[in-house]
Amino acid sequence: MDLLQLKFVQALSSEVRDEVLIVDAKVLIKLAECPFCKAASPYRHDSRTQEFADSPIRGNPVRIRLQRQRYRCRACRKAFFEPLVGFSAKRNMTQRLVHYIAQDALIRTFADVAEDVGLDVQTVRGVFLDFSDWLRAHHPIATPRIMGIDEAKRAKVLCTVLTDLQRREYFDMLPSRKAEPLNAYLSKVPDKEKVEVVAMDLHQGFVHAIGRHMPQAVRVADKYHVARLAQNAFDKAHVDARKPLPTGERLAMFRHRGLLATRDRRLTDDERAKVAKTLAPFPLLQAAHAAKESFLAIYEAPNKDVASRQLSVWLTVLPAGLSGYFRPLITAVSNNREIILNYFTHRYTNAFTEAANKLSDLLQQTGRGYGFEVMRIKLLYGKRGQAIDLTDYDADDDLPGGSATTAFVFSKMTFSSPTLRKKQASGGDRKRRGPSFARVGRLIGEGYYDLGNQTIADELEPLIREFAATA
C-alpha cells in the first residue's frame, strides 16, 4: 500500500527520526513539452530533493523528501520542474496538511496544532489567517431571522456580539459598543430586512440602533436583564436593612440572602417559613420582597394584554418608600415599556448569547492573548468550518501533461501576509519580515530566476525589490 496516497507521487522508503516520519518519494509525471513556449522534448537538466510537510500519520509529524526532475527547454532555455498535484500553491506542504491546519486551528490553540504537525506556531497562524480570508469571501454567514445582541469584553476590547438565536450560532462581532460604529455596521448588514425579532438588554445604543436600521424587526427586552433590575432593587434594600445590625445578626441575615433571592414558588414550606422569619423585623424589606416577587410574577402572564395590566397595577401600588430602590426598574419600564411587553408575543431571550459569551471567555483564556480578529474568526467559524468542503481551497491547478506547471504557481505566491498588508494600508510604520530566504532559494532552484535569461530576470526584478523592501 502506498504510504502517502498522493496523486502522481510514489513513496520509496520511510523512517522515524526524532518522532518525525520522513518519507522519501519521487514524482511520476514526465513532461513532453515546455510549459513556456510549448516546444517539444525538453531535456533533463538535473534533479533536486525538496522537503514538504504533510499531515500527521499515526500521531507523528510527516516530512516528504521529494525527488524532482528539473528540465530545460532547448528553444527558450528556461528551466522548470514537473508539476506537483496535491501540494499547496504557496507553502512547502501538501494541500491536505493545509486543510488539516486550517480546520483544526479554528477549534484548537495554535500551539496545540503546531505541536501535532511539527511546525512553528507562526506558520499555523499564517495558514489560519489565510483560511479566514477565504472563509469570509466564499462562505459568508447568512443574516439570522431571530437575532440576539449583547456586549462582551474580548481581547481587552468591549465589543458587540450578534448571534443567531434560532440556529444557536454566532453571527458577527464588532470591536466596539459605541453608537457610531454600530450604526455604520447595521446600515450595511446584507438582507437585514429578513430579521424578524431582536432580543437585547436595555442598553439604549442597541435599542435605538436596531429601531433605526431594522424597523421591521420586533425588539424584545431580554427577560433576565429586566428581572435582574427587580432583584438588584431588593438587594439594595437588604443591604440597608443589615447595616445597623450587630455583627452577629448582620452575618446571620447575610447567610439567608440565597433564600431571599429565590422565587417564592420554588421554596419549600420550611424555606418559606425561614424567609418570613427573616423579613418580619423589617417592614420595609418585607415590602421590597413582596414588590420584587409581584413584578417577577408578571412574566407568568399568559399574553401581552394581561401582562400590561399587571404592570400598570404594579406601578400604581408600589409603596412610595420603595421608589428609590426600584428607580432603575421604573425608569426602564417607563422608557422601554413596549419592548419589555413584546416578550409576551415573541418569547425569545438572550440566554444563548449569554452562554456563548461565557464559552468565549474560556477560549480567550486558553488562547492566552488572541487578538480580536482571531477571536472573531474562531467564534464565528469554529463550528461552521468543520462542515465546509475544502476541495477547492489552496488548489494549485496543476495538471499532468504540461498544461499548467509549477512555474505558474509563482504568480499566485503572496509576498506579504494579510496582517502586513493591512498595516501598510493604514499607514503603520511597523514592518514584518517578507518571505523567507528559503522560499526565494526555492524559486531560484526551480528556474524562476535564471541569471542567464534576461527575460526571467526582468520579470522578477519588481518582486525582488518588494522582498528587499519588506525584509
Image: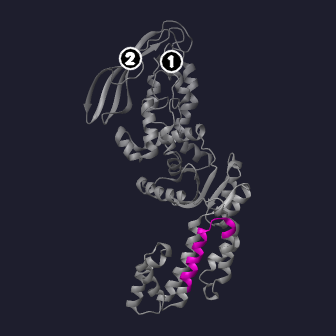
Q: Is residue 244 above or below residue 23?
A: below
Which residue occupies 58% across, 24% down? 458
Identify the mark at residue 47; answer none if there is no mark. Answer: 2
Which residue occupies 49% across, 48% down? 378
Give, as a single range, the part of the protein colored magenta.
287-306
Is-magenta flag for residue 292? yes
Residue 220 horizontal/vertical position (percent): 65, 61
Is residue 336 visible to us here?
no
Is residue 28 visible to us here?
yes
Q: Secondary structure at mark 2?
A: strand
Among all residues in the image, which is located at the extreme top?
40
Amino acid carrying mark 1 in the image: Leu
Residue marked by disc 1: 399
Residue 434 horizontal/vertical position (percent): 50, 39
Which residue occupies 64% across, 59% down? 346
Residue 120 horizontal/vertical position (percent): 39, 41
Is-magenta flag for residue 79? no
Q: Residues within 10 Å of mark 2 (few under 14, many from 20)?
A: few
Rounded to the nearest whole Å, what is the CA distance between mark 2 and mark 1?
Answer: 20 Å
Q: Is residue 400 above or below residue 212?
A: above
Q: Secondary structure at mark 1?
A: loop
Residue 386 horizontal/vertical position (percent): 47, 40
* Image side of residue 156 versus residue 120, left or right: right
